[in-house]
Structure formats: structure tokens, C-alpha cells
Image (tube, helix red, strand yellow):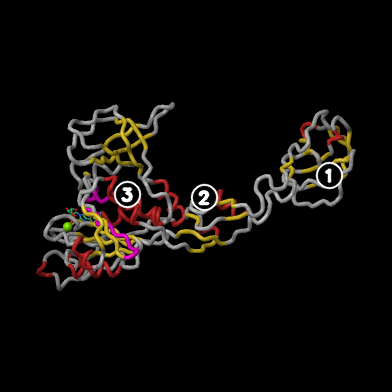
Amino acid sequence: MLSPSEALAAVAAVCRPLPPRRVDLHDAVGLVLAEPIRADRDCPPFPRAMMDGYAVRLSAAGARVKVIGEAAAGRWIDDVLADGDAWEIMTGAACPPGTEAVVPKEYTTRDGDHAAMPPRMVGGQHIAPVGSECRAGEIVLPPGEPVAPMSLAVMASFGVRQVAVMPRPRLGIIITGAELAPQGVLPAPGQIRDSNGPMLAAMAQPFLAERPTVAYAVDTHESLQRALAATADCDLLALSAGVSVGRYDLVPEALRRHGAELIFHKVRQKPGKPLLLARRGRQVLFGLPGNPLACHFCFHRYAEVALRALAGRNPMPMIHEAVLTAAVPARGGRTYFVPGRAVPGTGGAPWTVEPLAGVSSADIFHSHRANCYLEVSPRPRELPAGERVALTLCDLSSLAENLATEGRLWPIGSGVPVPPEMPACRSGTPADATASPTILE
Ligand code: AMP
Ligand code: MG
């Protein structure tokens, strides 16, 4: 059985960035550049005035000069500036030829078409020389970096209209388990509502360009193969449940029959011991435990790494440190990942984190306020309050960003075809199963 860090390394090793694609500039934000961007001209392309004031020759120091016109931003002047003359100049304007200094307006006194200059000035003051920010042909953005709004501004400065980037991966989600009623379907006796589907889709949304392909399957090989076929063109596949050792935990065998190569199964961690990683051609597949907290943790810790790696980003989770506000009970043998709520300290104090473990790996009801997972190594005694712990943050801020673009969260479940073998399609008991159509809540 792998340790959590070995499992993480295996995930990173199996994921290759997706083949680059050319997109319009405005679609590139957040994606990783796949080509170097070069300056097509010097920047600034002309000696640029950096202040509002007067363009003068150095001989104007302490003198009264004649203001011969306005050099507004956007105007091009060919006339060479002579000693004793000045142009009134605005920030961003091209300095007329012969300009040796720009004197800020506040150091001068205007009187009609003349202006008195201060006694001291330095050659080149308040002038950005041609190419002082970058030279034509220079690489201004290297490949491998995510495009931020400021990098967009860099490309816009050099007339870049389209750019090669690593695309965001396409995600498939397969919700397995005969006991699950998809969203909007009334659970039959013995069933529960699917909660992993909406959770996984929401966790994945910041990483995706398109809504995930979602399929449901009951615990039979036929049903699982159908769902696997429906999601075969996804770059990453997250299967929920059926990955443990129960009689109907068919996912590992179903993946083998589907032609996938198992990379690991089971990790020395709590929650999420049954986690599985497989590969089929370029497709990366995760078998996530069905227990909702374990499912959440495994997607956060491992599938998010894969989503970042496929998009060419730095895949490994960022580790932060915080001070525990309450003790964490001892766990022998396995690394214990505890959901927690981390808050920044005030006045220079370190971050603190409140552990929010519930009663089991199924319990999301005590943990839903969590914004991070603490990592606690196996230990014989409890970890007391006041100890420093390592944690990874669940990135809700990027979800908020994506929601701002998309308008709302993609609803998962309703509208997804429910396989006819799914008992939830039918009302209450097997006896009237054939008679009743899908019952919507
Ligand atoms: P399994 O991984 O199939 O052994 O499932 C472990 C537990 O998680 C069982 O109690 C399942 O009913 C529950 N479970 C599995 N899938 C889901 C789901 N999509 N939503 C909520 N609970 C689930
Ligand atoms: Mg199951």
C-alpha cells in the first residue's frame, strides 16, 4: 500500500499536459502558455514623457523658456527642439526630437506663452527611453506560465491576437451504486440520494471549461461498461464508490475489463484508504471511495493534482501551516487527514485551524464548514491544541471566479440520463417497478 506522498507522486507522474490549442487572447486567462511570446516592437516605441510638464533642453535650467506648442499623448512631432524653447507635454506623449528632460508642471511657473524652469535638472529626467522596458524580439512571456490578467496586458501590448495554450481537461463523473437516487429522483426504500455527484462537479468547476459528462451506473459490469463507454473521450474520469472490497465493489475489475491499467489501489490514509488510480491511453481514471467525506478528500488531494497537471500547471498542492485550536485524536498506522476551518491570524499572529472531524468517513454534516485538510502523521498520542500542523486549502475563491464567468454552478443530476437498470427510476418496491415511470421529487 502506498503512502499519501507516494500516491501523490504517482498521480503527478501519470498526468501529461494536454496537447496545446490556439485560443483567442481573452480565452487564455488562467491557462498555461504553450509558446514563448516575443515583443514585436520596442517598448516604449518612442521616448515617452512620464510626467505632465515641459519638454526642454538642459540649457533651460533656471531660465524662462518659450512654450511653442502642446505635445499631447498620441501626437507625433518632427520638429527638433531648440535651446530656449519648450513644448508643454503630457504623460504618455512622444518627446519631440532634441528633448533632454521633462520638467514636471509643479516645478514651473507659467506666464502667457512663457514658463520659468527650476534651477536644477538632470539629463533624461522623466523620460522613458525607447526600449527601456523591453526590446523588439525579446521573449516577454516564457511558456509554462499561467496567463494572468497582467500577462494578457503584455500580449495586448504586442498585438498578440491568438495564443497557444494547454487547454483545460474534460472531466467525466461516474456515480456508481444501486442505492443511489440521482438528483430530482425520489429515493426508493433502501436508497439514499446521490450527494457525491453535485459535490464533485462543484469541486471540479474551477478547473473546467465545459460542464463534466456525468453518468450513473448500478453495481453490474454491464451498467459500468455503459457508463465507461459514455465517458471514454474525457481526459480525466472520477468514479464514485464501488472501489472497496465488498461483493459489489466492481469498479477495479470493471476498469480492467475496460482496458485500463491499474497504477495503485489503496493508500495508507484516513479517510480514503480504497482510492484507486488507473490509466487508459491518455485517459486518467480515479476510483474514489463512496463515503462522501472520503470522496471529497480524495478528489481534493489527488484529482485536483491531476486536473492541474493535465492543464500544464504546477500540480502539487500548496502546503500551509496553522496552529491547532483543539486536539486531534491519535491514529496509528495511517496518515490522518482532518477537515478543518483555517482562519488568518490577526496582528501578525499565525493562522489557526479548527479541526472539524465528524463521526466517520461518511459524515459530511460536521465537516461542511471545512476550507482545508490538516495532515497528521501516524502517532500514538493525540495531537494537542497549540501544535503547528500542515494543511492544504480547498480553493473556493477560484470557484467563485468561475461562477462569475459562468453565472452559476452547473446543475448535476437533473437532465442526466438515468440508466433503465437504476432502481431509482421506479417507484417504491420491485413489485411495481415495471409499472411506474421515473418519479421526480
Ligand atoms: P462504497 O464505496 O460503494 O462502498 O460506498 C460507501 C458508502 O458511501 C456507502 O454507504 C454508500 O451508500 C455511500 N455512497 C456511495 N456513493 C454515494 C453517493 N454518490 N452519494 C452519497 N453517498 C454515497
Ligand atoms: Mg457501493
Secondary structure of residue under mark 3: helix
**Segment tinted magenta in the rendering:** 281-296
Residue drawn at (48%, 63%) of the image: 21
Residue 16 among those drawn in magenta? no
Contact flag, marks 3 and 1 (Cβ < 8 Å): no
The CA span between labels 2 and 1 is 39 Å
Where residue 280 sits: x, y (%)? Answer: 30, 64
Q: Residue at x 18, y 44 (%)?
A: 360
Asked whether 31 or 240 is in front, the reply is 31
> Could you give the CA–CA distance between mark 3 and mark 1, rounded to whole angstroms?
61 Å
Secondary structure at numbered mark 2: loop
Amino acid carrying label 3: it is Ala
Give the number of the disc on residue 98. 1
Residue under circle 2?
Answer: 148
Which of labels 2 and 3 is toward the front? 3
Classify residue 97 as left or right of residue 253: right
Asked if residue 257 shows in the view, the reply is yes
- The numbered mark, 3 or 1, whose residue comes first in the sequence reads 3
Disc 3 target residue: 9
Against 354, residue 288 (above or below) is below
- Tag 2: amino acid: Ala
